[in-house]
Image (cartoon, helix red, strand yellow):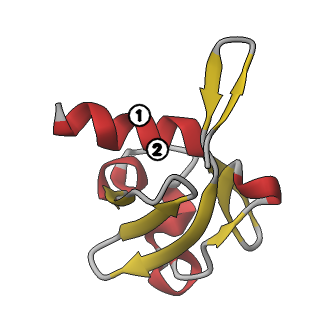
Amino acid sequence: MAVKTQGFTLHKIIEVAPISGYKLSVTFADGSETIHECAPIIEKEGGAFRALADEQLFRTVEVGARGRFIQWAGVNVDLCADALWLEAHEAKG
């Protein structure tokens, strides 16, 4: 379930799973399931996510504290639940 705070909706991730081709399947507490293409941010030259080009490392993805982000073992990067939710739902129109 998404939580409203000061007029903003905070989304919560309950499950994340890596998919081949540097994609992530993300399930939110509101029941929505989304697929996210991570290759563009991984392939960006000099980008913070470049380390995730190692597929074994990419597969270590996990849900972070309180479901508010996803993270990877040993890498100091994460993706915000709200940003992922908005990206997927704005794309659907």
Task: Give the farthest residue toward the left.
Answer: 93
The residue positioned 27% from the left and 31% from the top of the image is 90
Q: Nearer the viewer, residue 38 or 82?
A: 82
- Up-down relation of residue 11 to residue 27 (above or below): above
Q: Residue at x 71, y 56 (%)?
A: 67
**Which amino acid does the dot numbered 1 rest on?**
Leu
Q: Is residue 65 left or right of residue 92?
A: right
For the C terminus, the image quarter is top left
Question: Is 68 situated above or below 28?
Answer: above
Tell me whether circle 1 and circle 2 mark residues in contact (CB < 8 Å). yes
- 44 relative to 91 in the view: left or right: right
Residue 36 rendering spot, x and y as whole percentages: 34, 57
> Which residue is painted at 63% across and 19% down in the image?
8
Which amino acid, by three-letter code, is at mark 2?
Leu
Q: Quadrant of residue 24?
A: bottom left
Instruction: Compute the Cα span from label 1 to label 2.
Output: 6 Å
**Does residue 52 sit above or below 66 in this rendering?**
below
Relative to 67, 22 lies left or right = left
Residue assigned mark 2:
84
As helix, strand or loop, the secondary structure at mark 2 comes to helix
- Picture coordinates of residue 16, whole percent (x, y): 53, 71
Q: Residue 79 in the image: x percent, y percent?
A: 59, 47
Query: Image point 60% across, 27% down: which residue?
Result: 9
**Residue bearing the label numbered 1:** 86
Q: Residues within 10 Å of mark 2 (few under 14, many from 20)?
A: some
- SS class, disc 1: helix
**How crowded is the residue under tag 1: few (<14 C-alpha within 10 Å), some, or many (20+)?**
few
Q: Position of residue 5 (x, y in %)?
A: 75, 22
